[in-house]
Image (cartoon, rainbow, N blue to C red):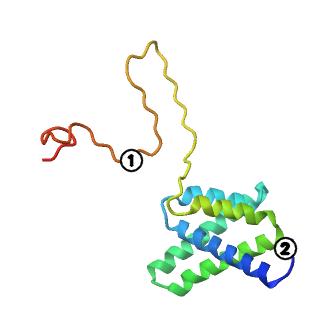
Amino acid sequence: MYEEGAGVDAELTALATAGATALVQQMATDGWAQARRRLVAYFSRGRSEDEETVEGELEEARADLAAARVADDADAAADVTAEWRNRIRRTLRADPAAAAELRTLLDELAPGAVQRQGDVNNTISGGVQHDMVIQAGTVGSIHLGNPGDPGGPGGRR
């Protein structure tokens, strides 16, 4: 448990605010499913019986946030953030180790952070392969052909 004190409480509040803000921002992104898994693990703290409950609460908050945005209701959206800020602050006060885990989670959820999507396993069978095999995660911009060839792939038209 954290010791009482204005400095510690201010630090917990700042961390809880950052956590709630990141959580609510993730609710509106394509990466929500992955973020939700991490958040469920954070809030259930390894208690599998709590995972369904936490997941339901997160989905309910996401629905509330979506409704608030459709209605252009900034107060209702702020309420969702406040609710999770208070919950995170209670978690931090109850478990000092939760602060380090939350900081790691915030780093993972930060815009521009590389999100690991999972393992990829390939098996090549059927004899000798005489061609390339490519395995990739995120692939950025690819240009094929000679850039100076206006008619070729990747060339100007």
Q: Report crowding for label 2: few under 14, some 14 to 19, many 20 or more residues within 10 A (C-alpha).
A: few
Q: Quadrant of residue 86?
A: bottom right
Q: Quadrant of the N terminus?
A: bottom right
**Above or below for 38 versus 1:** above
x then y, percent, for residue 90 = 77, 75
Q: Residue flagged by tag 2: what amino acid is it?
A: Tyr
Left or right: where does residue 129 sit relative to residue 122?
Answer: left
Q: Which residue is mark 2?
A: 2
x then y, percent, for residue 51 = 72, 58
**Above or below for 20 versus 126:** below
Q: Residue flagged by tag 1: what amino acid is it?
A: Gly
Residue with the most extreme top position: 127
x then y, percent, for residue 50 = 76, 61
Q: Quadrant of residue 119?
A: top right
Q: Which mark is residue 140?
A: 1
**Above or below for 39 versus 156:** below
Compute the Cα span from label 2 to label 1.
45 Å
* Residue 39 visible, this orientation: no
Q: Nearer the viewer, residue 5 or 58?
A: 5
Residue with the most extreme front position: 148
Left or right: where does residue 82 sit relative to residue 75?
Answer: right
Name the residue: 84% across, 73% down: 2
* Residue 55 visible, this orientation: yes
Name the residue: 61% across, 83% down: 79
